[in-house]
Image (cartoon, grey):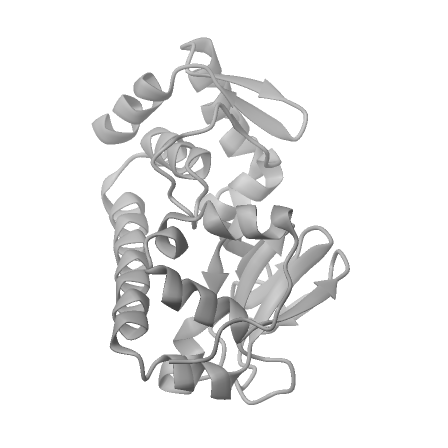
Amino acid sequence: MAALPRLHLSAAHRDAMGANPWFAGMPRAQREALLGAAELTHWRRGAMLFRQGDPVTVAGSGLYGLARGMVKASTLRHDGREAILSVIEPGNWFGELSLIDGSPRTHDATALTALDLLVVPQEAFAELMQDVVFANAMTALLAARVRFLYALMEDATLRDLRARVARRLCTLARGDATQSPQARDRVMLSQEALAMMLGVTRQTLSGELNALAREGMISLGYGKIEIVSFDALERCGTSG
């Protein structure tokens, strides 16, 4: 297992990382080894962390841990439109897939805000993976990703649009990639970004959101969606 951390994180950074259920679930030795293998980097808003098709061997590549800010994982559709796959919030680790199988990056990762980002180089990640406890934790993280993708496929093929909107709002309320046990009472995301997540037009989404608002499940604001009744929204997501 890698050595104890050389990295000195602020209390705010440690709190952000520790609030993530996956990271918090690892034994302390593995958590500290992961942090100790990382370098703290800073990125401006709009910066591209990596692009779809980038090799994992490029300088600065690795496993990423988001200590501050928000990152958009997205891809361009065949018609040139952007599809947002996920919004990554503080505490989350990402980019592990290419490190595990050596394949190019599967999507774009863009800074939605200024970022404080932990970067674990490929060599250090390979060393961490020699520890069976850490490797098992990474397996659990990948399993959660697969479950999330299966849920998205089920929504796209079996549920009507209103149910899909309700389910994605519930997911976002739990932190999208984070999936915290506790749901928040607001989603800080523009309707345009939500439409890109669902693969629909802004106008189509607006009609569904207004219907949910009339039914008392949500309240719409500028750049945010208030969750008035999470239980009702969750029921709507399973009924369509």
The quarter of the picture where the N terminus appears is bottom left
What residue is rendered at 48% in x and 15% in y? 213
What residue is rendered at 49% in x and 88% in y? 123
In percent of width and height, residue 163 lies at 32, 31
In percent of width and height, residue 50 lies at 61, 73
Quarter of the image holding residue 217? top left
Q: Residue furthest right?
A: 44
Compare residues 13 and 145 and report the one nearer the observer: 13
Compare residues 107 and 142 and report the one nearer the observer: 142
| Residue 41 in view (yes/no) | yes
Q: Is residue 202 left or right of residue 114?
A: left
- As displayed, is residue 99 above or below residue 202? below
- As displayed, is residue 45 above or below residue 228? below
- As displayed, is residue 158 above or below residue 95? above
In percent of width and height, residue 238 lies at 23, 30
What residue is rendered at 74% in x and 59% in y? 46
Compare residues 17 and 230 and report the one nearer the observer: 17
The quarter of the picture where the C terminus appears is top left
Quarter of the image holding residue 191? top right
